[in-house]
């Protein structure tokens, strides 16, 4: 089912949770709503599910306005952040709930409910846990029960609120890959909320980056990562080095740096900020053109990646660089070493365009 | 053992009592003397009076005791008390659940006012509570003429006693449920609605099972108070023997007539009910903890 969100606004007292939000979601897409806490992503999800009424705007499912439809009639599967499993029911009854509460006319027979529930429990690999209570399950298992419960009613839309938020890193990764696989099999239009950029980049077809109740950018993971439209998106999707300098003759100058900028800024003469990802900082042992001297102040070994903290010598500022383990070994860096750095790629934003 | 955050919120704080750590251990002398003081206090103020009730009740022998509790007036008082309880407690259960549901699952204007009003019967003296009903429904009261014209008796009759009892015991169920339902939040109800259940089914299958022990606990307290209520009922009952006397009123009359053994015999009956109530309450508290 396709979903259109048109100019939706929501206010809680004096707090504007959503401002004029519009998104077009294709049928079968897996969408990530990504943003910091308080950015309105959960509010938007709840408005789509009907758990929260919007103040303005419309929600359309398959071209039909459902803005005023009761949540129980929206045929939406909602997976809650803390699972919200029925604590006094077994896993089986949790999953069966949505089928059992149907009006008599549309309710499947007991045997059919049982078959369906066992099929779903098999899907989430919990068939041996049917008689357990939620408190007897681990976080990842509870999450899977919540998912099975939401899927039992055969929803046209699956909404997941921070589905992996409360899980440890390993389970989290496993579960999100599993969710992706599940989605590829069933093609239910799905929207999940997350504040973890890695999760969004890993799983989603498209990412909606939100901030202060507004949409900053919508695009494929690659698009938002490599072509962020605003400093906020750039900042939120990864670590970043800032070069606050001045644009002049197609170059950005900052300290001793003079960096060529894209052609669109060739005739701009203004204060601007260059954004460079840590892995785009080039480190050399000897001076080459365009580099400035810097001193290695810290080295963090994070598995396959090595993070290097550098202190620039021309201006009193720190830079963060990322190397692969091999690069790191070839360079043979030690804390205190003098090196030469330059940005390989940078993105320029002019501060006036964006108030940050 | 794995515990999710939502579960931790759900456990009432009384479960959170940790085993005493060594750092919090007082010297033996202090521990024993504190325990002794507490026990002595309890013995003097609770055990001694309770025992004396039974001693006085049986002072003139078992025959007098059983005669006292099977006397027509005593039986009528017991019957009236039971009738009042069977009307007042279920009504308070319904009101308490509705009030707690409204106050914890919804946001609306005047919520805090309602929360305060629910507590009012605890703050007001029961005598005043009784007087309020006299002022409303008595012969000189606001609706007095109308009630007289239509031959409806409220004051000095069963309806007045029921009303006064309901008023006094109003907060018990709601007070018990509000913190419980606040701690449980609304997410299970939201899950139920999003799975297609209507409001009633959500309440019946999700909310009620989650609050059943708390509700039961509140009902027991409510029940105990409804049986024992004296002040408010005394004002509205009119003390008509064999008609509008509840057990506590009957005891008072017997006592004022110097029939000590009979008074204490009925009192002992009430004490037994009270002790039974406490035992059931403890079982419920223990049950609700283990669920």
Image: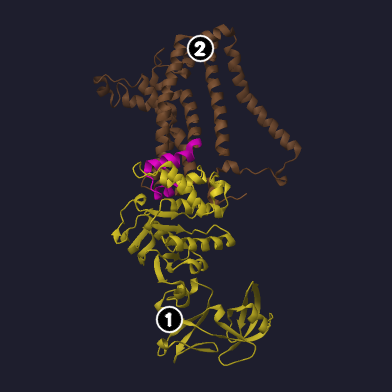
Task: Name the image quarter holding residue B138.
Answer: top left
Q: Position of residue B83 (x, y in %)?
A: 41, 21
Vertical comparison of A326 with A156: above or below: below
Q: Secondary structure at mark 1?
A: loop
Chain on which label 2 sits = B
Residue that appears at 49% across and 71% down: A236
Is residue A225 magenta-colored? no
- The one nearer the camera, A119 or A51, is A119
Main secondary structure of the magenta stretch: helix
Residue A350, numbered label: 1
Residue at image mark 2: B69
* Rendered residue at 34%/61% (across/down): A9
Q: Which mark is residue B131?
A: none
Q: Chain of mark 1?
A: A
Q: Which x, y percent locates residue B272?
A: 55, 20
In the image, is B249 to the left or to the right of A295? left
Location of the C terminus of chain B by quadrant is top right
Range covered by the magenta-colored residues: B188-213
Residue B185 in view (yes/no)? no
Above-or-below relation of A59 to B78:
below
Q: Which chain is brown?
A: B
Residue furthest right in the image: B28
Could you tell me if residue B140 is visible in this image?
yes
Residue B67, image x, y percentages: 52, 8
| Chain that is yellow in the image | A
The span from disc 2 to disc 1 (Cα, nearest Å) is: 93 Å
């Amino acid at each position: 089912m396709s979903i259109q969100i048109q100019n939706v606004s929501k206010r809680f007292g004096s707090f504007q949770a959503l401002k004029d939000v519009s998104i077009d979601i294709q049928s079968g897409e897996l969408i990530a709503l990504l943003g910091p806490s308080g950015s309105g992503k959960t509010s938007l999800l709840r408005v789509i599910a009907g758990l929260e009424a919007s103040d303005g705007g419309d929600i359309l499912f398959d071209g039909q306005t459902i803005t005023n439809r009761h949540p129980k009639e929206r045929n939406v599967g909602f997976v809650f952040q803390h699972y919200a499993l029925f604590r006094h029911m077994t896993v089986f009854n949790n999953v069966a709930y949505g089928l059992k509460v149907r009006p008599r006319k549309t309710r499947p027979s007991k045997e059919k409910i049982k078959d369906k529930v066992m099929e779903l429990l098999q899907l989430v690999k919990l068939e041996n846990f049917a008689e357990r209570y939620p408190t007897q399950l681990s976080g990842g298992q509870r999450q899977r029960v919540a998912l099975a419960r939401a899927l039992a009613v055969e929803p046209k839309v699956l909404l997941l609120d921070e589905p992996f938020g409360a899980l440890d890193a390993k389970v989290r990764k496993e579960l999100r890959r599993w969710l992706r696989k599940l989605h590829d099999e069933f093609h239910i239009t799905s929207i999940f909320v997350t504040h973890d950029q890695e999760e969004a980049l890993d799983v989603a077809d498209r990412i909606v980056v939100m901030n202060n109740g507004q949409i900053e950018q919508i695009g494929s993971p690659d698009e938002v990562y490599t072509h962020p439209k605003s400093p906020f998106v750039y900042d939120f999707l990864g670590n970043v080095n800032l070069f606050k300098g001045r644009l002049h003759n197609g170059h950005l100058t900052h300290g001793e740096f003079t960096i060529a900028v894209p052609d669109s800024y060739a005739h701009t003469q203004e204060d601007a900020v260059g954004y460079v990802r840590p892995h785009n900082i080039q480190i050399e042992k000897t001076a080459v053109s365009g580099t400035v001297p810097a001193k290695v102040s810290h080295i963090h070994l994070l598995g396959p990646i090595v993070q290097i903290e550098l202190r620039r010598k021309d201006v009193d500022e720190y830079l963060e660089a990322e190397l692969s383990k091999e690069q790191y070994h070839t360079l043979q860096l030690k804390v205190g070493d003098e090196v030469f750095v330059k940005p390989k790629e940078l993105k320029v934003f002019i501060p006036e365009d964006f108030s940050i | 053992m794995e515990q999710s955050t939502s579960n931790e919120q759900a456990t009432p704080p009384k479960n959170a009592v940790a085993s005493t750590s060594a750092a919090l251990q007082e010297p033996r002398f202090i521990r024993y003397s504190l325990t002794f003081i507490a026990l002595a206090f309890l013995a003097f103020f609770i055990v001694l009076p309770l025992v004396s009730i039974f001693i006085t009740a049986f002072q003139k022998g078992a025959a007098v005791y059983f005669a006292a509790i099977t006397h027509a007036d005593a039986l009528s008082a017991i019957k009236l008390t039971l009738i009042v309880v069977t009307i007042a407690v279920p009504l308070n259960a319904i009101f308490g659940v509705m009030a707690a549901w409204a106050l914890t699952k919804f946001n609306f204007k005047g919520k805090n006012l309602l929360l305060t009003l629910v507590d009012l019967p605890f703050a007001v003296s029961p005598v005043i509570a009784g007087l309020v009903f006299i002022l409303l429904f008595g012969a000189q009261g606001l609706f007095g003429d109308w009630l007289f014209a239509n031959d409806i008796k409220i004051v000095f009759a069963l309806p007045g006693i029921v009303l006064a009892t309901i008023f006094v015991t109003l907060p018990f169920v709601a007070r018990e449920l509000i913190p419980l339902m606040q701690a449980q939040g609304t997410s299970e109800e939201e899950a139920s609605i999003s799975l297609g259940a209507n409001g009633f089914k959500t309440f019946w299958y999700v909310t009620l099972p989650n609050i059943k022990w708390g509700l039961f606990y509140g009902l027991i307290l409510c029940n105990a108070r409804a049986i024992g209520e004296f002040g408010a009922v005394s004002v509205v009952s009119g003390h008509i023997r064999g008609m509008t006397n509840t057990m506590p009123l009957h005891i008072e009359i017997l006592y004022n007539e110097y029939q000590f053994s009979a008074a204490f015999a009925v009192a002992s009956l009430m004490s037994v009910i009270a002790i039974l109530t406490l035992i059931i309450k403890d079982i419920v508290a223990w049950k609700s903890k283990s669920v």
